[in-house]
Image (cartoon, coloured by chain):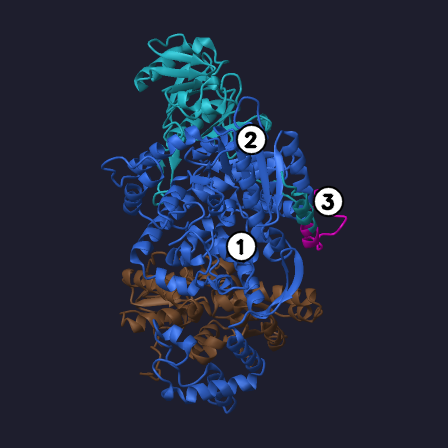
Chain colours: A blue, B brown, C cyan
Amino acid sequence: MSGTYLGLPSFPRAAAESTRDTQLRANLTHATHTIRDKRAVAIGELADWPQLRAAGAQVKDRTLRHLDHYLLQLEAAVTEAGGTVHWAADAEEANRIVARLVHATGESEVVKVKSMATQETGLNEALAAEGIAAYETDLAELIVQLGDDRPSHILVPAIHKNRTEIRDIFRTRMADWGRPAPEGLSDSPAELAEAARLHLREKFLRAKVGVSGANFMVAETGTMVVVESEGNGRMCLTLPETLISVVGIEKIVPTWRDLEIYLQTLPRSSTAERMNPYTSMWTGTSDGDGPKVFHLVLLDNGRTDTLADTVGRQALRCIRCSACLNVCPVYERAGGHAYGSPYPGPIGAILTPQLRGTDNELNASLPYASSLCGACYTVCPVAIDIPEVLVHLRERVVQGGPVTLRGTRTTIKPARGHAAERAAMRVGSWTLDHPAAWHTAQRLALRTRRLHPERAPGRTARAWTDSRELPALPEQSFRDWWRQRRKTRENGGDQ
Amino acid sequence: MRVALFVTCVNDLLYPDTGRAVVTLLERLGVEVDFPAAQTCCGQPQFNTGYRHATEPLVRRYATAFDGYDCVVTPSGSCAAMVRDNYPRIARRAADEGRGEELTEALAGAPRTYELTEFLVDVLEVTDVGAYFPHTVTYHPSCHGLRMLGLGDRPRRLLEAVGGLELRELAGAEECCGFGGTFAVKNPDVSAAMGRDKVRHALDSGARVLCGADNSCLMHLDGILRREDAPLTSVHLAEILASTEERPYRPKEREKVR
Amino acid sequence: MTDTSGSRAEILRRIRQALTDVPAEETPGDVPVARDYLRVHAPRSPRERTDLLAAHLTDYRAHVHRTEEAGLPGTVARLLAEHGTRRAVVPAGLPGAWLAEVSGVEVVSGGGGLTAGELDAVDSVITGCALAVAETGTIVLDAGPDQGQRRITLIPDHHICVVRAPEQVVDSVPQALPRLDPARPLTWISGPSATSDIELDRVEGVHGPRTLDVVIVTAQSSA
């Protein structure tokens, strides 16, 4: 497996393979069920959860509806506090800015806090091309980086690996990147964590440049917030001389007070804790404490296109808690890699096609990677109606319509490969809008039922019969039974 | 009260026994039911696959077909949720896209649509419907009934009041069975994996009957059960509630396709 | 430096174009936010609040010690001895009395001048805090005189943090934020460093201090 997302297969094809991987299935079932149950307990402690959830959604809606205002307010506050703000329209520009800032320090390596935004821009690969080594310091990101793998979960990028697989990666790969794994390393999580501690400490202690994302940016104060557990975040945010944070423009909250909502909902939804072990907040730079230089890179990369869609916009409320992944039955079986994006699971299925567009097979398949069961919406701490957006994006795929791409309004054509389905849907709708035709079609189907083959032909039918029997057909439709019954009754009989 | 049955296209063609059971049950409870022949399909397959525009005629048809009734009853949580949650959305989007207020107005005059267990518990205020069904049963709550309609414990309360019925807990009950309409054929591998897990839990419950309130989910699960020759029969909730000591449930007499 | 002002203007243009559905006269305050969630999740006496803090800290594997003012120096000395500490670092503004009974330990004051590598050779750090949050089991550091720079509570493997009860203990997150100054660097700590990255199961102890001793000090004969 390689670290890029180019040329990946569509979701159904990737999932066909991953659902058969019994080790992967076992790892995912164990992990997602563990966290699912804990989350329910953590949320049960707060009687006002529905109110917190609603307020969390409303604050984000307020932010999004006035995003230009809040970005300018944030920029002024960060600048006032000694930081420098950069604006990146797309991934390439963000990566270019970061590379330039690192070069300016004269350094050739950076330590990184786990960040979805830089995962999305492919920063590590871009820096490598510029001769800069980027070291991931979150335990799971380290596992992924050492294993030359791709992340498969927002919170726990190495969720697809179990402890034994992680031990094997540490044993074989740590030496290539620095301090080797201790002799006789076992697969106990405590020993694995200790190995990561030793391996990364030398990098933390010599690092001159740190790269991070942020969970929240407070517009009125210019404060950045990073929520984490291991302390690697604190290391990257406080020890280097230069700190560069790459953050999506939707990560703003208007006021300091607004944090009172998300600092309650995010940890409980994410790691199912009352509070995560470490939360760091900083505003610009401080004399004698932490980095002397702070750069904030504000990233668009498809977010404004998403904002332009009044139904799809709600995806930008996301606070990346990953609760939707942990309850999703499709994610649990297909695994995160099948989504072909740093954003897997239900939120990924609505975010990726909006950030990237629906013009390739993989992206166009993502809105269909859901049974619309609605479990994701139920657990979302900012009430994103994921099923609503999924259906909306399916429309974009098969019907086409007005969208904004890279800031330009345009009308897209229906995606290719749906022509037969579209024709069938049209015929179906016409038939169903003409009860007489529907009745005739029913009778035809039931009268010829003996002739229907055991395994129906055609790709769609095979997709059903490969794993399931077709329903047996009754002798008579309900409609005919009702009509017959009414006739009998009119003639004075009983049924 | 003028009550109309919306039998749904799946039941009309594939599961007429469920429709008959609703009629039998409601008439036993003193409710006169009508079946307006102008009804067809709620349009959920089209809508959920992305063909919103193709759904609009079916929204109009639904409103027209049930015009003049006091309420509509349907033995499908999924179709009830389609009508209640998505029809207003479709109408609003049609207006937004310049196709006028016609759908909104049509829906404004349409009667309220109830899923069967809602109608029994909320409207008729009955949980003991006088049914008799001497079997071990486990109940799968379908997603749309559970999460979109919020059916809660209504189906369970109805089942618990059935004479002779022994209800068995279903592990992971609230998890989707993997049907999901066209999901079942667009993502067949994930769909089947979900279905097999649901079937395994149902078998582990020790019940002989797998009960649901949505035949589309049962069609998918039953397809797996029969493929695996599993000792479990799927039966719609309405058919259990229609069953009495005098006129007990009879398994479907169907043309065996094989 | 290359000029990114072109992208600044472009992003702002895209945002304004994307928001044409928002009426021109709408202000941010017009978008409703119902703050009808609770400020506190249960009424508590000062004693109950402190007990809850202790319980929640313990729940996440912090070691909680309760003492009255007079017992604090002895507690600090005992915790250092139990940890086997030979070198400890303290912020410049730490009350000297807290260390009155410490012996056999080299204490470095105002450790911010130490390099990260030098701090790595320190066994323990002793600080006060800005406040503590009972409902979440959190202590908050704001780099005040008795807390020092963020790095000194990060690199040593053992952190002793003193919380004054009841005055430094608040019930909830909504009560904590107004008492904190966002202009200062803030670190919220809820138990020792931990990870859930292996099979989504929590394991304590990665990069931050693996042992967190919280000493809750109550004034004589008060809660």
Quadrant position of the N terminus of chain B in the picture: bottom right
Please check whether the numbered discs 2 and 3 fall on a single chain.
no
Q: In what element is the residue under mark 1?
A: helix
Observer-nearest of A53 and B118: A53
Inspect the magenta stretch and tell me whether residue A417 lies in it. Answer: no
Chain letter of disc 2 in the image: A
Q: In this view, does A248 lie to the left or right of B128?
A: right
x and y percent of residue A119 in the render?
Answer: 48, 47
Amino acid on which the number 3 mark rests in the picture? Thr
Q: Mark 3 points at which residue?
A: C27
Chain letter of disc 1 in the image: A
Mark 3 touches mark 1? (CB < 8 Å): no
Quadrant position of the C terminus of chain B in the picture: bottom left
Q: Name the residue under label 1.
A: A351
Amino acid on which the number 1 mark rests in the picture? Leu
Taking A275 as reference, is B105 above or below it?
Answer: below
x and y percent of residue B170 in the render?
Answer: 34, 59
Figure quadrant of residue A81: top right
Chain letter of disc 3 in the image: C
Q: In this view, does A215 lie to the left or right of A448?
A: right
- Other-residue count near label 1 (Cα within 10 Å), few / some / many at <14 / 14–19 / ≥20: many
Of the image marks 1 and 2, the number of the one nearer the N terminus: 2
Mark 2 touches mark 3? (CB < 8 Å): no
Q: Name the residue under label 2.
A: A282
x and y percent of residue C37 in the render?
Answer: 57, 40
- Other-residue count near label 3 (Cα within 10 Å), few / some / many at <14 / 14–19 / ≥20: few
Please check whether the numbered discs 1 and 2 fall on a single chain.
yes
Q: In what element is the residue under mark 3?
A: loop
Observer-nearest of A370 and A299: A299
- In the image, the segment drawn in magenta is C14-31
Taking A193 as reference, is B95 above or below it?
Answer: below
Number of the front mark, 2 or 3: 2
